[in-house]
Image: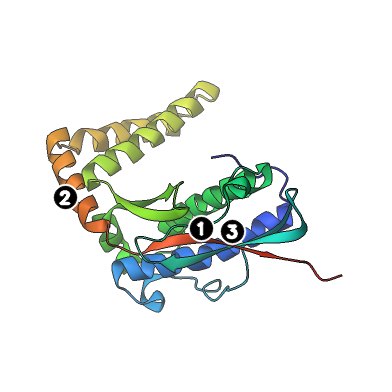
């Protein structure tokens, strides 16, 4: 996905705030836990305004308003192919994808209440974008496999830091990380069976759909 490099910093921050609202609503729906019981900070939960409004060259007299909403599993964005192929459209979709991914991971790390962390870890899902339907859908990953992947990423980061600094604490962190990695045991066959079964169930789950409206700006 391509990032919208021509989107201003102010607009980017606004998009993150609005994306956070719908992602919080989705996580609440997915886990069947009220927002107030799931999140620490709920200040962005009621954002209802469009995510982004952009002029599109092929629609010279109109602006395009992008928004995110919870939708049925079979939702598909219905817009002309020429709009899908417009460079401006692709850039905004790229940044919407980036926004949702960043917000989802940020919420997992810093905004889930402590007593709900175990539930979130057990459900072990990510969001991916169906780039034909233009909707985000949940993807389950076998928890030990997901944890193993996260620890490997942390290991790579620490090893990279060690190359730039000989700080003894980094070597200690690496040693402890390797111990954690050694304790994670699972087979790929077991992981694949669990993921296949769970992801078949998730096909009926609601999604986060991208909506697009066109309008003539007032003069």
Residue 174 percent across, percent down from the top left: 36, 31
Q: Residue furthest right?
A: 219
Helix, strand or loop status at disc 2: helix
Q: Left or right of 13: which side holds 124? A: left
| Res. 176 image quadrant | top left
Q: Are marks 3 and 2 in contact (CB under 8 Å)?
A: no
Q: Are marks 1 and 2 in contact (CB under 8 Å)?
A: no
Helix, strand or loop status at disc 1: loop
Residue under pointer 2: 197
Q: Left or right of 49: which side holds 115? A: left
Residue under pointer 3: 16
Residue at the (16%, 47%) spot, across then down: 194
Residue at the (40%, 29%) spot, across then down: 171
Q: Residues within 10 Å of mark 3 (few under 14, many from 20)?
A: some
From the viewer's perspective, is residue 186 above or below residue 217?
above
Residue under pointer 1: 78
Helix, strand or loop status at disc 3: helix
Distance between mark 1 and mark 2 Cα atoms? 30 Å
Q: Residues within 10 Å of mark 1 (few under 14, many from 20)?
A: few
Is residue 187 something that shows in the picture? no
- Between 13 and 130, the residue placed more toward the observer is 130
Scheme of image coloration? rainbow
From the viewer's perspective, is residue 39 above or below residue 106?
below
Among the two numbered marks 3 and 2 on one chain, the one whose residue lies closer to the N terminus:
3
Among the two numbered marks 1 and 3 on one chain, the one whose residue lies closer to the N terminus:
3
Among the two numbered marks 1 and 2 on one chain, the one whose residue lies closer to the N terminus:
1
């Amino acid at each position: 996905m391509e990032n919208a490099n021509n989107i201003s910093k102010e607009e980017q921050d606004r998009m993150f705030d609005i994306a956070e609202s719908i992602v919080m609503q989705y996580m609440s729906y997915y886990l069947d836990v009220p927002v107030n019981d799931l999140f620490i900070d709920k200040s962005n939960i009621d954002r209802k305004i469009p995510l982004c409004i952009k002029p599109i060259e092929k629609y010279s007299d109109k602006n395009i308003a992008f928004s995110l909403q919870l939708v049925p599993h079979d939702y598909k964005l219905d817009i002309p192919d020429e709009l899908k192929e417009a460079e401006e459209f692709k850039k905004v979709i790229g940044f919407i994808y980036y926004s949702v991914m960043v917000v989802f991971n940020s919420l997992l790390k810093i905004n889930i209440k402590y007593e709900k962390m175990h539930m979130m870890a057990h459900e072990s899902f990510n969001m991916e974008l169906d780039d034909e339907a233009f909707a985000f859908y949940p993807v389950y990953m076998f928890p030990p496999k997901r944890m193993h992947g996260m620890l490997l990423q942390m290991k790579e980061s620490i090893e990279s830091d060690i190359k730039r600094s000989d700080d003894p604490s980094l070597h200690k962190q690496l040693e402890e990380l390797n111990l954690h990695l050694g304790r994670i045991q699972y087979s790929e066959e077991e992981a694949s069976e669990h993921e296949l079964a769970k992801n078949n169930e998730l096909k009926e789950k609601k999604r986060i759909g991208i909506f697009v409206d066109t309008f003539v700006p007032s003069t």
